[in-house]
Amino acid sequence: MKKLATHRPRGMMTVWVAVCLPVLLAFVGLGLDTGHAYTVGQELQSAADAAALSGVSQLSTSFAAAKTAAISAAANNNAAGASVQLANSDVVEGNYNTSSGTFTANGTPYNAIKVTARRTTGSPGGAVNLFFGGLVGLSTVNITRAAVAFTGGGGSSISAGVILLDPSSTGSLDMYGGGTLTVGGSGGTVYVNSGAAKAVEMQNGATITAANLDIVGDDSVSGSTINATVNTGQQSITDPLAALAAPTKTTDLGSLNLYNGTTETVGTGDQTAVYYYSGGISVNSGSKLTLNGGIYILGSYGLTIASGTFIANNCMFYFTGSGSSWAVATFEGGTTTTITAPTTGTYAGMALFQDRSTPSADSLVVDNGATVSISGTIYLPSIDVNYSGGTHTLGNQIIAYGFLIDNGAALAVNYDGRNAITTGGTGVALGQ
């Protein structure tokens, strides 16, 4: 009898192929999608690097300029076939510590930009689509890369208790008539950014005591004493607080003026509360004004202590204006002023902050006979400080355009290491 052929093995093979083929395709697809994701990650990293470097190059101008530059640079790069789009929150300013290799968001001094380039759910570009991920229930993947670019790559950090930003004037630091400047505390530097041949002028018994006197240009000293190591021909620097944003005005409260021996106390103790006085604050005729915490935005006559006592606890003063009317601080003879900076909030450690648009012809004035004690940073990036007589403790740091000390004025700055200057080039730290 003839045997019939059996087809059972071929049938079993068909079943096995039917079962295994999707698994094999899933593995092949997984490999292809993994390679695709890796490539997109590299593209995002390149975009983050370019954006961070472009942003940090504008950090000395403003954080807004740095953010705009970073967003624009990222958009010039593609990831997964589309332009890389950054959200505003993807660009963060802060401090990069070259010794530890760490970035601190919103840390000071501001010397770095961190950019996060992302293709994730909810990001401007969305998550990355996968080719075969649907076979295993995964159609997209989230990919994120970041970079930190910082100024001062290969450079050095300088602790400066007094920083004068004027880039070119003769007598940017001008001292005579027995005036003295002492930078104590952490033994900081006096840094004069002017490249003039006589950027520092000292005569008639003037004295500087500090760890260093660093000058981009040179000095002219006659009959005066420098108790510091003098270093001329230094690198020009940028404003270490250039990225600090101005406070926002609130309801206009007009002006706060005290006369005829009156006494008044203002503020609830909230250090972050904002008060806007378009007409400024003044104390006259032996009056006494006490401010308990807050950010005070002053226009017109600014802060004028003409006669009497002024006490501001945990306060910052922002001086602004427009046209031909700009607020400044003036402390006249026979007055007593004590100001302590806030200890919390955006402006922690800041005592005085001058609007960067203020014309350089204006100045902060402390007259002979005034007694002034200020703790915190005095930040006057576009105007000079004019000291004439008296003994004063003026802040933990002074950053101003220029400085005049005369008529026996004795000025002490109790520097504590804040807002150091970073000199050098630009560096990038990948994959932060």
Image: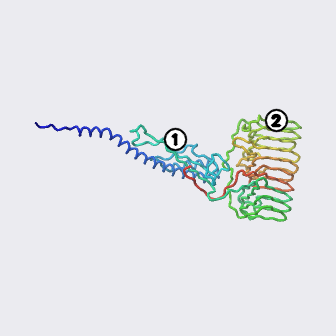
The relative height of residue 330 versus residue 137 in the rendered view (above or below) is below
Q: Name the residue that disc number 1 marks.
A: 123
**Sequence-first tag of 2 and 1:** 1
Q: Position of residue 19 (x, y in %)?
A: 32, 38
Q: In terms of secondary structure, where does tag 2 sit? A: strand
Tell me if I can see residue 256 in this picture: yes
Q: Name the residue that disc number 2 marks.
A: 265
When asked about the image quadrant of residue 187, the answer is bottom right
Task: Count neighbours of disc 1 (C-alpha within 10 A) and say few if under 14, some if 14 to 19, many if 20 or more.
Answer: some
When asked about the image quadrant of residue 179, the answer is bottom right
The relative height of residue 251 versus residue 233 in the rendered view (above or below) is above
Tell me if I can see residue 325 in this picture: no
Q: Position of residue 168 (x, y in %)?
A: 71, 60
Q: Residue at the front extreme?
A: 1
The coloring applied to the image is rainbow
Q: Residue at the left extreme?
A: 1
Residue type, label 2: Thr
Residue type, label 1: Ser
Disc 2 to disc 1, C-alpha distance = 49 Å
Please name whichever residue, 126 or 8, is drawn nearer the observer in this view of the structure.
Answer: 8
**Which residue: 79% across, 62% down?**
201
Q: Position of residue 411 (x, y in %)?
A: 82, 53
The relative height of residue 234 versus residue 299 in the rendered view (above or below) is below
Residue 173's disc number: none
| Quadrant in which the N terminus appears | top left
**Contact flag, marks 2 and 1 (Cβ < 8 Å):** no
Please name whichever residue, 164 or 256, is drawn nearer the observer in this view of the structure.
Answer: 164
Task: Count neighbours of disc 2 (C-alpha within 10 A) and say few if under 14, some if 14 to 19, many if 20 or more.
Answer: few
Q: Position of residue 82 (x, y in %)?
A: 46, 46
Q: In terms of secondary structure, where does tag 1 sit? A: loop
Is 67 displayed left or right of 201 in the figure?
A: left
